[in-house]
Amino acid sequence: MDLPSSCMVVTGFGPFRQHLVNSSWEAVKEFSKLGLGTDTVVELRTLQLPVDYREAERRVARLWEDFQPQLAVHVGMHTSAKAIFLEQCSKNRGYQDADIRGFRPEGGVCLPGGPEVMVSVVSMKAVCRRLDIEDVEVAFSGDAGRYVCDYTYYLSLHHGNGRAVLIHVPPLSPWLPASLLGKALQVIIREMLEDSREAQAQRLVGRKLEPH
């Protein structure tokens, strides 16, 4: 596979259930104003995904086809969280909760015949260890929750050969406004980008060392 482009796609989700404002999209909008910093030459694209299995599936396939990003960052809202969670992996089965259109994936499966678990090339534990963000806790997670955000993550990992991540943010509150979540995303995503570059470089070195 060729080297990925110097593009990054960051997605958030729209309203669902009683949540008329989704903190994930509000955080992504704030992050997009900040960007990645002047020292990072990466084209940044942001997209809102609906909490709709079929439409999210179509849009994820399209973003990988159109942009071939070096990393796709998906941000979802964890409705009961007080911290930001970095999700290491995604599961193929167990999607029983209906989306905003009342749809459930057939058999509760993301990808029939796909691996039971897909794992990001980014080491979430390593990223967590390096982070120190004022006023917000960031934690590692190994279970992304089996809803549309987890479903999206699995399919993005599939299309991107592991070059995808999922970040769960808490709901907005007076002590966790969108501006703070946006700043936290900037710090987290910069670290994830660095980690993914290191992983990509290691894979390239490994290929050169393989016997031909």
Image (cartoon, rainbow, N blue to C red):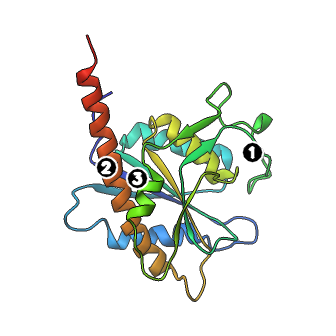
SS at circle 3: strand
Q: Position of residue 147 (x, y in %)?
A: 70, 52
Query: What number is the disc on residue 95?
Result: 1
Q: Quadrant of residue 91?
A: top right
**Label 2 belongs to which residue?**
7
- The disc labelled 2 sits on which kind of residue? Cys
**Label 3 belongs to which residue?**
9
- The disc labelled 3 sits on which kind of residue? Val
Quarter of the rendering occupied by the N terminus: top left
Which mark's residue is nearer the viewer, 1 or 2? 1
SS at circle 1: loop
Q: Is residue 139 left or right of residue 68?
A: right
Q: Earlier in the sequence, mark 3 or mark 1?
A: 3
Residue drawn 76% across the image and 53% down it: 101
In 3D space, how far apart are the residues under numbered discs 3 and 1 (Cα atoms)? 25 Å
Residue drawn 29% across the image and 36% down it: 202
Q: Report if the CB atoms under discs 3 and 1 are less than 8 Å apart.
A: no
How packed is label 3: few (under 14 Cα within 10 Å), some, or many (20 or more)? many
- The disc labelled 1 sits on which kind of residue? Tyr
Q: Position of residue 193 (x, y in %)?
A: 34, 54
Q: Report if the CB atoms under discs 2 and 3 are less than 8 Å apart.
A: yes
State the residue lying farthest toward the bottom.
174
In 3D space, how far apart are the residues under numbered discs 2 and 3 (Cα atoms)? 7 Å
Q: Position of residue 52 (x, y in %)?
A: 67, 51
Query: What number is the disc on residue 170?
Result: none
Q: Quadrant of residue 51?
A: bottom right
Q: Position of residue 108 (x, y in %)?
A: 76, 39
